[in-house]
Amino acid sequence: MTHNNPVSLTQFLIEEQRAHGTLNAELRLLLEVVARACKRISIAVSKGALGGVLGDAGTGNIQGEAQKKLDVLSNEILLQANEWGGHLAGMASEEMDHPSCIPGEYPQGGYLLLFDPLDGSSNIDVNISVGTIFSVLRAPEGVDPSTDEAFLQPGTDQVAAGYTVYGPSTLLVLTLGQGVHVFTLDREQGSFVLTQRDVKIPVQTREFSINTSNARHWEAPVKRYIDECLAGKDGPRGADFNMRWVASMVADVHRIITRGGVFMYPIDAKTQKQGGKLRLMYEANPMSLIVEQAGGAASTGRSRILDLVPEKLHQRVPVIMGSREEVERLVGYHIN
């Protein structure tokens, strides 16, 4: 169906509900609440120093990372927005040790929400794009939704995933398992409007995204891949490659979804003990579902990320995702 008039997120979700039948009213309302919370975070981010929200909060999260004031504020916005609607059985956040229970005075729903409230927050104080990542799971029957165990489901079980980019414009990128769609926040109207339907990652690419300051710690397959890219036209790839690194996963992956490439935060000597750098439940799983739905691939280097059965709520994993051909090449280097 084509539309001359702008299609709002609400209209898009209602039409998806009619077309596919996989999206029920409860999930639709949950996604609308998450989007509203992201609008509030977008406003807080855009105020910058005027809102008094820059700098460190003076606290740490479970990963031992210093929290920014906006990390804490974004986490609170998402918790408060979602706790009363009756769509959720529980929530888990990268910023909290354990799941957050739905207060007793509110009804419980059939879903679990996981989120990284402000990804790339180290970039806040220098005014570089940051974002929110979220994942939706079904609450398993017979398992207490306030326990970590309720959330330990493989990425293939996600019913929806998305992220917002707070950049020059605020974008919401969403998958319900039927392709990837992009919405832009219309600040005058106060609503997200569909601007790209069924986005596909370009298959062939000449761009990679990795923190090269860790080069001395890399495993041999990653070193080989990057060396071949850097050798350019005279090397085995026969082409020149560009490198981009924002240090905000949302911004780096969004660039790859838009124009192709491969994003890597591989395991290396520095992150070996903890299993990787990025979190499986809050970052790797939702982003992997989005990337795969956009025609790309996502791997640890040795196995598909979405197939991993999580052992811990804050488990870390190596991440290689983006254009399918490049990810497959990297996996081949790891296996052979």
Image (tube, grey):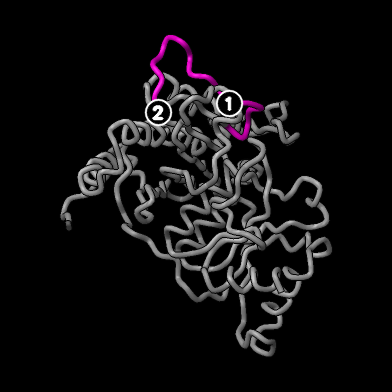
Q: Residue furthest bottom?
A: 234
Identify the main secondary structure in magenta.
loop
Image quarter of residue 95: top right
Figure label count:
2
Measure the C-alpha gap from mark 2 to mark 1. Answer: 15 Å
Q: Is residue 42 left or right of residue 225?
A: left
- Residue at the location (61% across, 42% down)? 124
- Residue at the location (58% across, 37% down)? 152
Q: Position of residue 221 (x, y in %)?
A: 74, 70
Q: Is residue 124 left or right of residue 292?
A: right
Which kind of residue does numbered mark 1 sit on? Pro
- Residue at the location (52% across, 68% down)? 323
Instruction: Using the image, determine if residue 121 lies above or below residue 72.
Output: below
Give the magenta part as a residue range.
93-109
Q: Secondary structure at mark 2?
A: loop
Quadrant where the C terminus is found in the figure: bottom right
Q: Which residue is mark 2?
A: 110
Viewer-closest of 227 and 156: 156
Q: Which residue is mark 1?
A: 99
Q: Position of residue 290 (x, y in %)?
A: 46, 53
Which kind of residue does numbered mark 2 sit on? Gly
Q: Secondary structure at mark 1?
A: loop
